Amino acid sequence: MRKMRAALFECLFGERITWGAILRIMLWALLFFLIINTCFPQKKRVPEGLRYGVQLKGKSVQPMNLPRSDPRGVRTTLPKELEKEFLIGWIGGSSLHTRANLNRKTKQWGHETFVPVEVAKILGCKTEKEVSVALYLLSAQRIFDEYLCLLDALRYKPDLVVITLNPVWAFNSKSLSFWPNLYSATIENGLANFEDLTQIALFGGPSNIAQGLLSRYFPLIRNRFDYRQDPTVKIASLFHERHVISNQYDRLSMAMNVSQPLQFWARFEGGKVKDRSVIGWQIKAMSYIDEGVDGFHHIILRNMIKRVNEAGVKTLFYLAPFTPNAWDDEMLYRKLKAQEHALSLLAREYNSSNIHIISENPARVLPELEYRDLVHIKDSLPLSDYLADEIFNLLEKNGDGQ
């Protein structure tokens, strides 16, 4: 029996590993996917699990990202709620989600909103236009994740792009990416530019690239996450993902947002993270921020500026507010100043009427902001008013104001 299997394998794939053998394997794989995609009954897809989908239901601000365990990464089409007169592509992390006054018994927040929601309202009044926001909000979003989200946002030809840079992660050399499901989801967006393609290939593996390219032609591959959620579909085991925890953001996956890969670096350097609270991890992350201007994160940031410049889309870059209560700490303040210095250099280097880079942290001009930790604020209105004014000034400079 073993000899028969060996003979069959040799007949199909060849005796030795050669380019011809690799080509035959690829052709057999394509044939398999073609047959199974044609013959397997297409089921009604499970609705895409959107975080913040409940809070933003029916609003002109809609989340575009799927759960971290969903290999599809992002939505494939623009939601109908966003078919407005003026479209903003907003990319940022959890600092955009403002919450305060938690009821310990009901676990409900007395105040909860999103900065882009408030900015859209204010900007709509200023411009007398219907404003909608395609929101790419990812918890603990790293700089390369923002880059991939930008590539996806540019597909929809937005009128404006806003990029929120998290002071904890944006300039962090030790953690450049946290959302690997974006690799295959955005590979098609990178095909138009060789530099984008090489960077996606640098972070993702061959499987990410293959899945991203095949998903376009094989819905069964694209929607394999949905099939895994349906217990009646026995073929679901073929699409097992090792990193899938659940479709929900459980406590474990949320804890990973701030602790990974910092635990690795702490062990690598022979130290320990004594304070494992959110603020403790944020401080540890800040300690790894590169104070120079030639790190890989700077290359990614420059590429982001190049892409929006090439697309001719008006763009605002700004740092999320960083609590002044931490400025007395010499290390934290030094890191913050290094970020502001790097952004000021980029603002001078890429001086354009289309691009506005706010190098100064908004906390310096908004002392009334209240914070839950280093970068999460309780009330969005002071920041929303400030950003709406900056955006309106950018639009007026380009003749797109009221």
Image: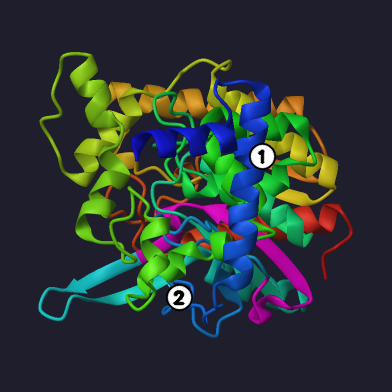
Kindly indicate the quadrant of the structure image that contains residue 347: top right
Outermost bottom residue: 58
Label 1 residue SS: strand
Kindly indicate the quadrant of the structure image that contains residue 401: bottom right
- Whether residue 318 is visible, yes or no, is no
Tell us which disc is closer to us: 1 or 2: 2
Most foreground residue, 184 or 96: 184
Q: Which residue appears at 27% of the width and 45% of the height?
A: 256
Q: Which residue appears at 31% of the width and 46% of the height?
A: 257
Query: Of the numbered discs in the image, which one, if any, rests on residue 53?
Result: 2
Query: Of the numbered discs in the image, which one, if any, rests on residue 189?
Result: none
Q: Which residue appears at 89% of the width and 59% of the height?
A: 399
From the image, tell me which residue sits under label 1: 357
Side of 5 relative to 109 (left or right): right
- Identified by mark 1, the residue type is Ile
Mark 1 Cα shell of 10 Å, populated few (<14), some (14-19), many (≥20): many
- Identified by mark 2, the residue type is Gly
Which image quarter holds the C terminus?
bottom right
The mark that comes first in sequence, 1 or 2, is: 2
Residue 175 x %, y %: 40, 31
Label 2 residue SS: loop
Side of 298 relative to 338 (left or right): right
Residue 12 x %, y %: 58, 38
Q: Which residues are magenta?
A: 78-98
Residue 309 in magenta stretch: no
Kindly indicate the quadrant of the structure image that contains residue 374: top left
Most foreground residue, 22 or 164: 22
Most foreground residue, 61 or 366: 61
Is 199 drawn above or below residue 313 in the view shown? above
Q: CA distance from mark 1 to mark 2?
A: 30 Å
Residue 394 x %, y %: 76, 53
Residue 396 x %, y %: 82, 58
